């Protein structure tokens, strides 16, 4: 299960909670694409509430990051996923 919350105040923010896997990846992708079209400037994606990310979810996060999203995380698991995606040490 995935909960997606969008905060459109500047800076815009998308909060993901639960599992970014299976059909929930497509749901998150649709929300992200809509947010990208409707907002000017950068936006943040808060991943602190995620408990699991499958390979397709990782691919979505990599695409978001490549297109300028500020991926925010805490906790060993999510920070390790972000390190793999961004090639950096630690999340933002």
Image (cartoon, helix red, strand yellow):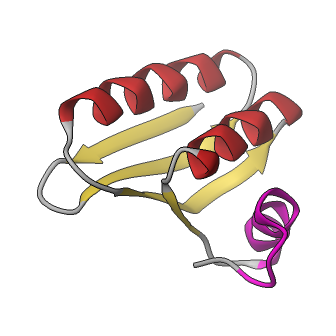
Query: In the rendered view, does 47 fall on the left or right side of 83?
Result: left
- Looking at the rendered image, the quarter that the C terminus falls into is bottom right
Front in this rendered view, residue 33 or 46: 33
**Magenta span main SS:** helix
Front in this rendered view, residue 49 or 8: 8
Q: Work out which residue is located at the far left of the displayed protein and give it.
A: 9
Q: Work out which residue is located at the far bottom of the displayed protein and give it.
A: 89
Give the residue displayed 50% in from the left and 53% down from the top: 68
Above or below: residue 15 compared with residue 29 = below
**Figure label count:** 0
Give the residue displayed 61% in from the left and 23% down from the top: 24
Above or below: residue 81 compared with residue 23 = below
- Looking at the rendered image, the quarter that the N terminus falls into is top right
Q: Position of residue 65 (x, y in %)?
A: 60, 52
Front in this rendered view, residue 3 or 27: 27
Above or below: residue 61 compared with residue 36 = below
Which residues, given as a range, are shown in magenta?
Answer: 76-90
Magenta stretch containing residue 80, yes or no? Answer: yes
Q: Identify the image quadrant of residue 56.
A: top right
Give the residue displayed 33% in from the left and 56% down from the top: 42
């Amino acid at each position: 299960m995935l909960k997606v919350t969008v905060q459109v105040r500047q800076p815009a923010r998308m909060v993901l909670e639960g599992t970014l896997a299976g059909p929930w990846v497509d749901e998150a992708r649709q929300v992200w694409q809509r947010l990208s079209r409707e907002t000017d400037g950068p936006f943040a994606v808060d991943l602190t509430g995620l408990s699991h990310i499958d390979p397709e979810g990782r691919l979505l996060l990599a695409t978001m990051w490549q297109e300028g999203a500020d991926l925010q995380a805490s906790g060993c698991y999510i920070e390790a996923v972000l390190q793999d995606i961004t090639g950096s040490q630690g999340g933002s």
